[in-house]
Image (tube, grey):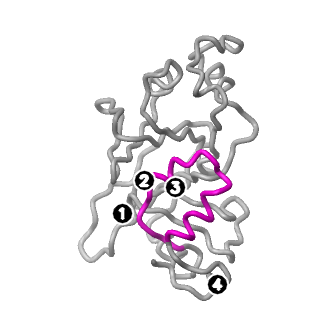
Amino acid sequence: MKMPKSKRSPGQGTTLEGQLLVAMPIMTDKRFARSVIYMCAHSKDGAMGLIINHRADHITFPDLLDRLGIIPKGADDTIASDFLDREVHCGGPVETGRGFVLHTADYHATDSTLEIAGGVSLTATIDILKAIAIGRGPQRSILALGYAGWSPGQLESEIQANGWLNCPADPDIVFETDLDLKYEKALAKIGVNPSFLVSEAGHC
């Protein structure tokens, strides 16, 4: 996947890179209903982000490690215990067979880690999964399959159509382990009463 460049073009509004998108109740696409998306890139070339509150119910972390040939299935004793029960996220409908790890900046791989904002980074190589599996990965992380992508101008149009709210990302929301709480926490950070969301604008 070629990520959109983060450099802003002349005349472009504030980039949403490093912010959260929160789906409005009028969101008609079921894939994004009640979703919270961490924006990894946003420029005149398009936008890319990861849904951080949807589960990939069809696969577990040990299953994924086995599928990628990192650690054989059943060899749970070789996986750090803190990660045996971790959830795999559904990051979006694009390239659903590809893995992305959103994580704290205490892990960095030269040439493969993208530093985004506020101490949050993105890595999409097998090496970080190997490190996580043996307890040498980042302190906090999210593993997602697939991503959400927008063509040039598409996301801006969706925001203008009242499809999304946006606000600065909070690491405590991004890396919250209870996925069911993220939507409510994101709305609380924005400070908008859910009953008024339909008539609110797309910015906080």
Reading the chain from its start, which is encountered first: label 3 or label 1? 1
- What's the CA distance linking mark 2 and mark 1? 11 Å
- What's the CA distance linking mark 3 and mark 1? 24 Å
Vertical order, 187 against 81 (above or below): below
What amino acid is at disc 1?
Ser
What amino acid is at disc 3?
Ile
Q: Mark 2 highlights which residue?
A: 40
Tell me, for residue 173, which label it has, or none: 3
| Mark in front: 4 vs 1 | 4
Q: Mark 1 highlights which residue?
A: 43
Residue at 52% x, 74% y: name it.
165
Reading the chain from its start, which is encountered first: label 2 or label 4? 2
Disc 2 secondary structure class: strand
Residue at 29% x, 30% y: name it.
110
Q: Residues within 10 Å of mark 2 (few under 14, many from 20)?
A: many
Provide residue 106's location: percent of width, then percent of height.
34, 35
Provide residue 59's location: percent of width, then percent of height.
72, 33
